Image (spheres, helix red, strand yellow):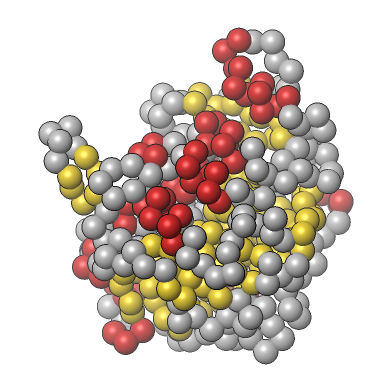
Amino acid sequence: MLAIGCGSKSRRYTSIDALCAADKKAGQDPPDNFGELEPPVGNKLAVHFLNVGHGNCILVECPGPTSKNSVLIDCGSGPARSLARDRAPQLRQKDTVAYIQRILTERAGETSVILTHPHMDHVSRVREVLKPDQKLGKVFLGGKRGSYSSVLAPSVAKWLSNVAADKIQDATNRTDTRQLDIACGGAKFYRLTADARGMKRTLFNRFVSYPNATSFVTLLRYGKFTAVFPGDATGSGKLPTTAKALQGLSQISPPVGGVSLMASAHHGSATHGSNNTEWTNGTRPQITVFSSSTSMGHPNCAAVKRYHKYAATRKTKGHDLTCTKGGKSWSRNYRVGMAKALYTTQDHGTIRVVTDGTTVRVGCDRHSNGTARFCGVDIPAGR
């Protein structure tokens, strides 16, 4: 790994230096004893980004005091590759199960599920984290039910076979914006798009099925707080998912002036138009989280730069963020000083965002011990 500091004179890293130039307060992570993030009690909503390595696993704790429900948005991890390059130890499957089950058991409510698309790094742990006796709400699928097959996603295919048919809603060619049937206290979930016709162009100039382009893109709104979960949404091809999601965003009432929290598309990739300029300019997120691992070349430094433009400034010292240039097979890793609210699970561990609908705080757990420490953002929700 190559460490690049702010103010580097190397011409090779001009784009990295441009990021650093805006971050005069960049430094090291705050000490572990800086202060714990308060638990999401009362009217607070929490979003957990579990550090599962190359994968996505997001749990939303609905705001109370009457609601004890939760929402699981994907839960999977890809193959373990070169894990030593990641700064924060990732949660293995048994740790992921323990983390989620602790929360679901304490809350004792129902859990709704959103599976963005049928890739293993998004769904491989769903069956394990949701016990057979788990009270389920609705289950929403990006793409057709049949695409969650024993070939693409054997574990979740088996889990779905045991879920009552009336609870499952696949999103076959759904490009209209609609509120989802999810009971989550005062929080509301909206489908921005979920088009099962997602395609990409091949070398032979033909369009073929491409699961990333079928991603179920979700908006969460709670008071002035908004969050977007795009799965592996793409921005190119015959039916660009991010463009359709932006159209959906424009249909939300009251209008969304800017997103409070963004789960970066496709782990921060810059391929197939993911995290393109149109997407970042249209959403303007204050906080962006990259569920990523350097072993797969994520996040891409170009994508980080696009989100950097709109990210809120941290109130404490800056932190390091690792990004890559190039594809996963030939990428080089760069460590960038950040005083902005941009986080990666590979650098900062499991990340927890807590809001009461008016203000937002971010906590990080680099040691995977279940305790979230305040890591530098305490801002008003919304722009």
Percent x, y of residue 264? 52, 48
Percent x, y of residue 61? 62, 73
**Does 261 sit above or below residue 340?**
below
Percent x, y of residue 89? 61, 47
| Farthest-out residue, bottom | 66
Dividing the picture into quarters, in which one does residue 380 lie?
Answer: bottom right
Quadrant in the picture for the N terminus: top right
**Does 293 sit above or below residue 179?**
above
**Does 250 sit above or below residue 106?**
above
Q: Residue at x 78, y 44 (%)?
A: 314
Q: Residue at x 82, y 33 (%)?
A: 25
Percent x, y of residue 293? 51, 41
Q: How many marks?
A: 0
Q: Is residue 346 visible?
A: no
Relative placement, left or right, of 196 versus 232 is left
Question: Between residues 180 and 371, which one lies in front from this camera angle?
Answer: 180
| Farthest-out residue, right | 34
Relative placement, left or right, of 344 versus 33 is left
Q: Is residue 190 visible?
A: yes
**Does 103 sit above or below residue 234?**
below
Q: Residue at x 26, y 61 (%)?
A: 196
Q: Residue at x 76, y 31 (%)?
A: 23
Relative placement, left or right, of 256 versus 224 is left
Quadrant in the picture for the C terminus: bottom right
Question: Between residues 140 and 155, which one lies in front from this camera angle?
Answer: 140
